[in-house]
Structures are given as C-alpha cells and as structure tokens.
C-alpha cells in the first residue's frame, strides 16, 4: 500500500511534531530549569555580595567609631585625677582663693558609690571612684566668677554639681557661696 502525497506530507508533519515534542521534553525544558536555577543562585549570590558590602562598610564605620571612642576615653583618662593629683587639686582650690582675697571656710571631699547603671559604664577603670567636694567660701560676685573660671580651666575633669549663693549679715560685704564639684578619681 503506497502512501499518497497528502499522507506523506501529514506523516512528515507528525514526525516533525514528535521530534519537536521530544526535543522540548528531553532537552529544552531541563535546560530552561537549569537556567532558572542558575539565575536564582546568581540573584542569591548578588544579594549576599551586597549584604557583605554593607557589612564591610558598617564594619569600617564601627572601626572608625571605636578608634574615636578610644581616643575620647584616652582623653578622659588623661583628665581624670589620680590619688596624689586629687590632693594637689584640693590644695590648688585652697591656694587659688588667696590671691582673689576670698576666704575658704571648708573643703569637704566625700566619696560616692556608683549606682548599678553607672557601674556598667565605668568598666574601663574598675579602681575609679566618684568624689564630690563641697566648698564653702566667702567672696564677692566678681571674685567668684574668676575663681569658677579658674576651676573650669583646670586640666582635670571636674563638674560643678551645685552652686548656692547667699547674702549673710555675718560676712558683709562678702557673699556666702556653697559650691559642689564632682570628679572621678582613679586609684593606682
């Protein structure tokens, strides 16, 4: 039985369709799946690279911040009083009043305990203490101003915690001044 021309053409189309189906089924579809898988891996790798770039940038920023904070701590450490320096500081406070014709009535240092939240902050020097100095002196406004400027210019880290100025009939024309200073001392 001989195939007619039309049947031959139809058979050729069927063979071409089967070949295309088999090509698609066994070659093209697995290749497309591999390509999609590789594209997903490339996207994941790109996102990891961008994440690593951000982390490295953050690390560099953190390193510069650490260096800045270490230098700041070093500066604070240099300005923190040591045991002998504290005694010299108290003598300085008493002596500094003489040229200004001020009368230092009392200097009372007292050590304070750190609160639990401050203890965590003061881990750089476990031997450090917070000391408050209460000064009572008699002075005029102008002389008090220059005295406070002298304290401010000291190379130590001292903070004025309280200042009370009263007129007192007993010490006229001077004023009674109560001054509180707070500082940190490192015991060596």
Image: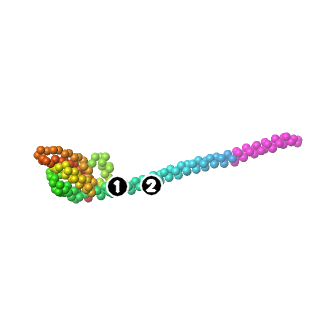
Q: Which mark is residue 80?
A: none
Q: Residue at x 25, y 53 (%)?
A: 152
Q: Determine if the magenta segment contains residue 119.
A: no
Q: Residue at x 19, y 52 (%)?
A: 143
Q: Spatial distance from mark 2 to mark 1, Cα to Cα? A: 18 Å
Query: Going by the picture, which residue comes out furthest to the right?
Result: 1
Q: Which residue is mark 1?
A: 72
Name the main secondary structure of what is drawn in magenta: helix
Q: Earlier in the sequence, mark 2 or mark 1?
A: 2
Q: Which residue is mark 2?
A: 60
Contact flag, marks 2 and 1 (Cβ < 8 Å): no
Between 25 and 60, the residue placed more toward the observer is 60
The number of numbered discs placed on residues in the rendered structure image is 2
Between 183 and 49, the residue placed more toward the observer is 183
Q: Residue at x 22, y 51 (%)?
A: 145
Q: Which residues are magenta?
A: 1-27
Q: Is residue 140 left or right of residue 3?
A: left
Q: Which quarter of the image is occupied by the N terminus?
A: top right
Badge 1 marks a residue whose secondary structure is: helix
């Amino acid at each position: 039985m001989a195939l007619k021309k039309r049947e031959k053409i139809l058979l050729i189309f069927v063979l071409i369709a089967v070949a295309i189906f088999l090509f698609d089924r066994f070659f093209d579809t697995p290749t497309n799946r591999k390509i999609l898988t590789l594209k997903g891996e490339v996207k994941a790798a790109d996102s990891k690279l961008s994440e690593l770039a951000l982390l490295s940038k953050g690390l560099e920023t953190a390193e510069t911040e650490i260096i800045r904070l270490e230098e700041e701590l070093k500066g604070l450490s240099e300005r923190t009083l040591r045991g002998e320096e504290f005694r010299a500081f108290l003598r300085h406070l008493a002596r500094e009043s003489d040229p200004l014709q001020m009368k230092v009535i009392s200097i009372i240092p007292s050590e304070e305990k750190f609160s639990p939240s401050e203890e965590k902050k003061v881990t750089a020097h476990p031997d450090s203490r917070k000391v408050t100095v209460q000064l009572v002196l008699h002075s005029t406004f102008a002389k008090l101003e220059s005295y406070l400027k002298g304290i401010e210019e000291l190379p130590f880290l001292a903070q004025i915690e309280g200042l009370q100025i009263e007129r007192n009939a007993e010490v006229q024309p001077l004023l009674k001044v109560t001054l509180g200073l707070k500082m940190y001392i490192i015991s060596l």
